Amino acid sequence: MGIRLDWEIESERERLQSVGEDPEAAKRRRRALRRIILFTVLLVIIGASIVGLVMLRLQQVDEIFRQNLLDTVENEVAAVRIGDRSGFTNIQRSDSESWLQSQQQLYDDYQALKQQPNLVLSGRVLDTQIDGPRGRVLVEEIINGAQYARVWFYWRFDDGWRHVPPDYTFWGDERMLENDQLAIRYWSVDEPFAQELAASLPAWLNAGCQALNCAQIPQLVVNILPDESVQPGWLPDEPWHMRIASPFLQPVRMDAIWQPENRLAVAGLLAEQLTTTVSNGLEPIYPADAYYLRQVIASWLTKRFSGVEINTYSIDTLTARYGDDVVGRLLAQMTPEANVAVMAQAAGVPSIADLEIDWRDFLTWRLTLEQELIAARDDTHFLALYDLNDIAVRDAAFSRFEEAARGTRLLVSDVTRGVDEVGNPALFARTIVLGTDGSTREEQVVFRLVDGTWKRAS
């Protein structure tokens, strides 16, 4: 290999550069590439503009449909307001004659309500949802100053929107509120109701478990269903899975969506479930005292949850005197055939005569039980309620079993603690006797402590 001089190397570089791309060709290529990019950007802009215009048009059409629906609702409510039956009827449409008749009844009901100065048919729509030809609205009305709402359904026909029967498949999207204690499944119409349940039920569970000394309990599952046939209750074989009908199936007062009767029903179900769980499924045997005590504990919890007054004087005063946790101990110590002495055991006192509680509801139950046993001709259990060691009491019991008037009711209005003529602890119950003819009278019934329990001594 010879030695290459600098001028030879430079000459070779010039030759290599001369065989590369022509500068003019490179310039033309770059101009072509820019034109392709600009054309592509222009196509994208045009396409986006077309899509935007289509979307805008669709929004305009949707808004037109929505406004037409609102106008239809306004016309329907206005027809009711001014008493235009024909105008109201023309907006109703269905193949169901019974539904059309029910709408005529609704019209008549409104006309009757209008005679009172407490109805405002504002026609204001609180919520609107449209899905293709289907429409759903929440319509406001004011009754006695309170805001109510109704869910109405519509269908878009060739001649416009028409009021149609309920379509429960169009109840919104499915949703869930969930934590470790509670899962609520519902559709969007029931969002306000689900929020109320979510705010109340965990507090109920905590209060119930604190009183009953619960161990770990399963997660409570609540299904809110747009189904008029559903009553509050548990699913078969799923004791912690509750079903509740949507309150929006009927006119709903918006500041009290959870209606009192429904609230009471749910409180009762939950109280029963907690009582059953804590007592390990205890099934008291009728007519033992345990049969009543288990019921009154569930009623006491129901009252705590719902705020509805229930006559549970014995448990109210038991917890007030000995603490809420006495109820859990009572359930734990109760047997299927336990008598009332188990209350003393739970409270930690020697005898039921030492219990500082109100016996009115318990003694009312005992007297009601007598009537039931007489009607059932069950003399064995009937006589077990009496102090048969006292001959006079025994004779009175036999006579009462044979001659007692059927259908009378006895209510204990007051109970005084004391002792009988020989110094035995006793309860003196002032009792109201309600006759089948509507008559009332008062009498005193004495209960004496015998063998650790209260027995009738008069």
Image (spheres, grey):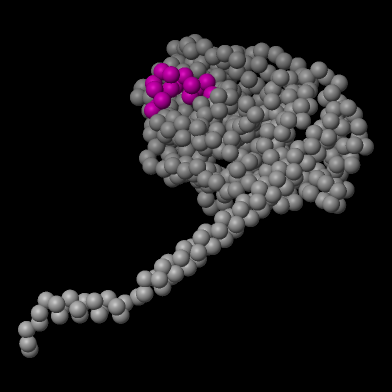
Residue 340 vertical placement versus 39 (above, below): above
Q: Quadrant of the N terminus?
A: bottom left
Judge from the rendering whether residue 163 lies leftward or rightward of residue 211; answer left or right. right
Residue occupying image coordinates x 68% and y 18%: 433
Residue occupying image coordinates x 74% and y 28%: 141
Let me know if residue 211 is in the magenta part: no
Judge from the rendering whether residue 335 lies leftward or rightward of residue 415; answer left or right. left
Farthest residue, direction front? 7
Q: Quadrant of the C terminus?
A: top right
Residue 103 vertical placement versus 443 (above, below): below
| Magenta-colored span | 312-326
Residue 444 point in image, percent of width and height: 60, 13
| Residue 17: quadrant of the picture | bottom left
Instruction: Name the foreground residue: 77 vs 256.
Output: 77
Asked whether the viewer can see residue 433, the reply is yes
Residue occupying image coordinates x 73% and y 30%: 124
Residue 93 point in image, percent of width and height: 85, 47
| Residue 328: quadrant of the picture | top left
Instruction: Name the foreground residue: 38 vs 61.
Output: 38
